Amino acid sequence: MATLSDVARRAGVSPATASRVINGSSKPVTDDLRERVLAAVAELQYVPNAHAQLLARSHRSAVGVIVHDVSDPYFAEITRGLQRVATDRGRLLMICNSYRDPDRELEYVELLRGHQVAALILAGSGYHDEAFTRQLNEKLAAYEATGGRVAVIGRHEHSGDAVMPDNRAGGYLAGRELCGLGHRTIGVVAGPRILTTTTDRLAGLRQALAEQGRDLPERRIRYAEFDRDGGAEATARLLDADPELTAIVALNDSMAIGALATLRARGLAVPQQISVLGFDDMPIARDVTPALTTVRLPLVDMGVRAMSLVLDAEGPAPRVEVLPAELVRRDTAGPVPPAARVSAGAAPRARRAEADS
Amino acid sequence: MATLSDVARRAGVSPATASRVINGSSKPVTDDLRERVLAAVAELQYVPNAHAQLLARSHRSAVGVIVHDVSDPYFAEITRGLQRVATDRGRLLMICNSYRDPDRELEYVELLRGHQVAALILAGSGYHDEAFTRQLNEKLAAYEATGGRVAVIGRHEHSGDAVMPDNRAGGYLAGRELCGLGHRTIGVVAGPRILTTTTDRLAGLRQALAEQGRDLPERRIRYAEFDRDGGAEATARLLDADPELTAIVALNDSMAIGALATLRARGLAVPQQISVLGFDDMPIARDVTPALTTVRLPLVDMGVRAMSLVLDAEGPAPRVEVLPAELVRRDTAGPVPPAARVSAGAAPRARRAEADS
DNA sequence: TCCCGGCGGGAAAGGGCTTTCTCTGCGGTA
DNA sequence: TACCGCAGAGAAAGCCCTTTCCCGCCGGGA
C-alpha cells in the first residue's frame, strides 16, 4: 500500500507539500510541484489512509447510527431521512444493526465512540428495563461529556435531544376509528411487551376504548415479534381464543401483513368479516390487497429531524420534537359485519368453523 | 476524551502495560497491576481510539460492501447473508449504498480502500459501460495488488472471484412457464437497459420464446427504474400500447408489485385476465394478493458465498460460483384466458375498454 | 546597495495506540 | 558468593498523516 511519503519521494517533494496538494490546502504550491505530486498519486494509485487522517486531523465528522435493522422498512425509511441530511452536509454515516439486542446496542455505542463519531443517533423503541436503561444512559452521558452529540428517535430513556413519534396518539386514532365503525370486540397483535413502543401504542388504544366505556382485556392482546411472522402467529392465537373478534389492530405494518396472511389462510374476508388496522404506514402498505388502513408516522421526516438536531449547534434546553401520527384510511377497515352487531357469539363462531375447514 | 496514557497515569503504570491489559495480550501482567488498570478504565470510561488502533496494528479486519441500496429487499437479503458470515468470523462490515450511481461506486471503492478494509464485496448488477467498467477494474486491480481481496455478486466486469445468480436461466424459466401456459403475447417490464441484470434476464426469456418459435419484439418491452413505481409506470405504458397482452414478466419483484398495482387500478383480474411473473422472490412476494409467481434467487446464500469466498484463503484460479434460479409457482400466473386463445385482438381490446372506464 | 516582507517549501512535532527491545530484580545453580 | 536466566515492567520506535513553525530566497522600496 503506497503511503504519502512514497508519493512525496516519487514526486521529489516533501510529505508536507504532497499533503498540501492532495488535500487542497490553502497554502499555495507552485504548479510545477503540484503536477508532479498529482502524477505520482495517479501512478501509485495512492489513497490516503483514512485512519491516519482521522488521527492527525482533530475534527470528527462521521455520525453513528444504531437501529434495529436497516432492512426493516420502518428503519429503512428513517435511515433514508438521516442519510439525506447527512449527505447534504458531507457527513459519513456509520450504520449499525442492533437486532434489538440490548447488549449489542451497548457494544455499538462503545464501538462508535471508539471510531470517534461526531454524533450518535439511536433509533427504535426503548426498553422497559431499568438496568439496561441506566447503563445506556451512563454510556451516552460519558460520550456527551467528551463533546459528542446524541439524539434518540422514539426512545424515552435519554434525557437529551429526541424526536418522538406520537405513538400514544396513534394508538388512540386507531382505537377511535374502530369504535367509530362500531367494533366492540377488538384484538391486538402487539410487539414485544418490553418495548416502550408497544406499550405506548397500547396505551393510546386503551384510552380510545375507555372513552367509549370499554376496556381492552389482556386476553385480547397477543405479544409476538414485531415482524410479519410474529403478526401471523399472534393473529392465529388470537383467533383461536376469541373467534368472535371483528377487528384486529396490529401494532406495526409488518405484523399487519402477517395478520392478513393468517386471515386469508383461514378464509376470513377483510374487511367484510373482520377489519385490520396497521401502524407506521410503510411503503408496502398500499400494495397489499386489500390496501392496508394504518396509522402513518412521518418516518423519513423523523430521520431528517433527528439528524438536524444532532448537526445543528446545540440549543439551550434538550430539544424534544413530537411528530404527529395520522390515520390513513384504505381498504382493510370497514364497519362491523351485521351478524356481529346483533350477537357477539353465534354468528362469528359459525364463520370460524367454516373458515377452518 | 480519555486516552491510553490517561489510563496508564491513573493506574500508575506505563502505557505499554495498560495496553497489554486492555487487549488481553499474551504477555503476562501481575494481577495487582491488571486490576488497577481495569479500575482506571472503568473510572475514566475509557474507549480505545479505533483509528489509532487500526493505524498501529498492521492487520486489517473490516470488510467493505457496496450495494445499490440496503433497504431494497434484494440487497437486504444479500446483506443478511454477508452479515451472517462476517459476524461469525468477528468481522465488521462497512456497508455503502451506491444508489446505482457509477461515480459514487468508484468513490466508495476508494473510500473503503482508504479505510483499510481487508476485503471488498460489490453486489448488484454490472453496467454496459466500457469506460466505467475499465475504471472500476483498474481500481479493483490496484486494491488487489496491495493484498486486498475482492468478490463481486452478479457482476461480469470483474475477472476475479464472483458469485453469479443465473439470471439467464431464470429468464428462461419464466419464458418457458408462460409458454407452457399458452401465452403468446407477453410484455416485459424491464429494469434499466444499461444493467447487465436486465439484459441477462431478457436474453433467457428470449431464448425460451425462441424455442417455441416466437420472438420478443422491442415494442413489448418497457424499460424503467428497477422499483415499484418503475414497474407500475412501465406496465401502464405497455398496456396502452398493447392491450391484447395476456402476460407480463417483470424483471424483478418490486416491479411486479408495481405491475400488480397498475393492473388492479385498471380492473384487470390476475391471473384470470392477465398473468404476472416476478423475479427474485423477495420476502414480500408471498404476501401480496394474489401471491406472486416468481423466479427465486437464493439471495441470502449469495451473500454467504460471497463473504466466504473473500474471507477464505485464496484458491488457485478465480473462483466463480453460479447459483441456480428456480421457479416458484404461486397465484399470479395462470393459463391464457379463453378469449385470447381464440382471437388475439378483439376480446382483449374490449376488456381494456371496460377496465379503463 | 541593503534591508525587509512575504512567499513557497521543508523539518518536525504530534495524534493515540501497539509492540519490540531493553532493563531491572529476583530466584536458582555451581 | 558469584553468575545466569527469566519474568515482568517500561522506554521508545514506529504506523501514516496533518499542521505548525521555521528557513531560504526573491523582489521591492529606501
Image (cartoon, coloured by chain):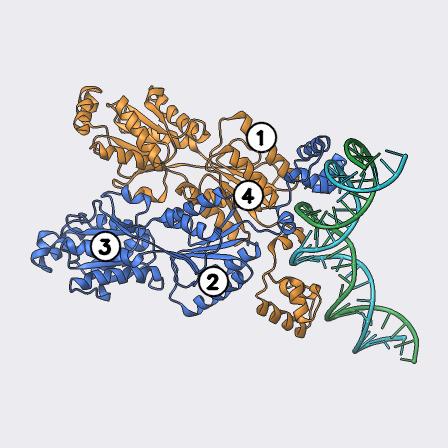
Chain colours: A blue, B orange, C cyan, D green
Disc 1 from disc 4: Cα separation: 23 Å
Q: Are marks 3 and 1 in contact (CB under 8 Å)?
A: no
In primary-sequence order, the first of circles 1 and 4 is 1
The residue located at (57%, 54%) in the rendering is: A116
Q: Amino acid at mark 4?
A: Leu
Disc 3 from disc 1: Cα separation: 54 Å
**Which residue, given by chain and number where applicable, does mark 4 sit on?**
B309
Which quadrant of the structure image shows residue B78? Answer: top left
Q: Amino acid at mark 1?
A: Gln
Q: Estimate the x, y position of residue A182 in percent, counting from the top left.
A: 13, 55
Both marks 2 and 4 on one chain: no
The residue located at (61%, 57%) in the rendering is: B49
Q: Estimate the x, y position of residue A138 in percent, counting from the top left.
A: 49, 66
The chain carrying label 2 is: A
Could you classify mark 3 by the number of other residues whose Cα lies within 10 Å: few (under 14), some (14-19), or many (20 or more)?
many
**Which residue, given by chain and number where applicable, does mark 3 sit on?**
A174
Please tell me the numbered disc located at residue B146: none
- A210 to the left or right of A67: left
Residue A186 seen in this snapshot: yes
Could you classify mark 2 by the number of other residues whose Cα lies within 10 Å: few (under 14), some (14-19), or many (20 or more)?
few
Question: Circle 2 — which element?
Answer: helix
Quadrant in which the N terminus of chain A is drawn: top right
In front: label 3 or label 1: 3
In primary-sequence order, the first of circles 3 and 2 is 2
The chain carrying label 1 is: B
